[in-house]
Amino acid sequence: MTGGPRDVDGPADSVGERTCPAWCRTLHGVSEGEDDWLHVSEPLVVSDDVTARLCMSVDPRTHEADGPYVLVGSREYSLADAEQLGERLIELTATAASVTPRSAA
């Protein structure tokens, strides 16, 4: 699969696969209007009660896109902010890995 939008025939007011990104797992055509414009990826389980997923909307008439964004729990991150968060978490774990535990005195 490619990362770009797929373009196939379909009604102008229904998303279907006309502008659906390869990562989208939304079943289009079930909802009407703007609810059908939403593209959501499969969830990535971060912890027992937190998931992360990609999300964006595309107007099927104008092809204007809002997103994609990364949703982590209830927080929305731009792709750049999500990448920065990931880099900071990696830095944090690298710092912790370089620390030698203190021996009990």
Image (cartoon, rainbow, N blue to C red):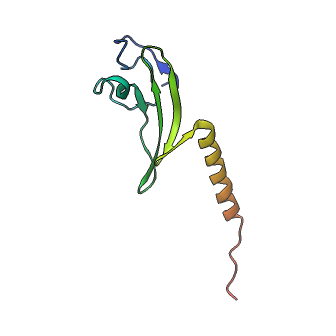
Tell me where residue 23 appears, x and y as whole percent: 46, 31
Is residue 21 visible from the viewing direction of this image? no
In-front residue for pair 32/51: 32
Count all numbered tags in the image, as a single digit: 0
Tell me where residue 62 appears, x and y as whole percent: 47, 14
Question: Which residue is depicted at the point 68% across and 58% down?
Answer: 94
Give the quadrant of residue 96: bottom right
Left or right placement of residue 104 versus residue 32 in this view = right
Quadrant containing the C terminus is: bottom right
In-front residue for pair 20/98: 20
**Residue extending furthest front?**
33
Left or right placement of residue 87 versus residue 3 in this view = right
Question: Which residue is depicted at the point 33% across and 29% down?
Answer: 27
Question: Which residue is depicted at the point 38% across and 20% down?
Answer: 15
Tell me where residue 36 appears, x and y as whole percent: 35, 26
In the rendered view, would you say 69 is above or below 85? above
Left or right placement of residue 25 versus residue 90 in this view = left
Give the quadrant of residue 39: top left
Is residue 50 visible from the viewing direction of this image? yes
Tell me where residue 85 appears, x and y as whole percent: 62, 48
Left or right placement of residue 64 versus residue 90 in this view = left
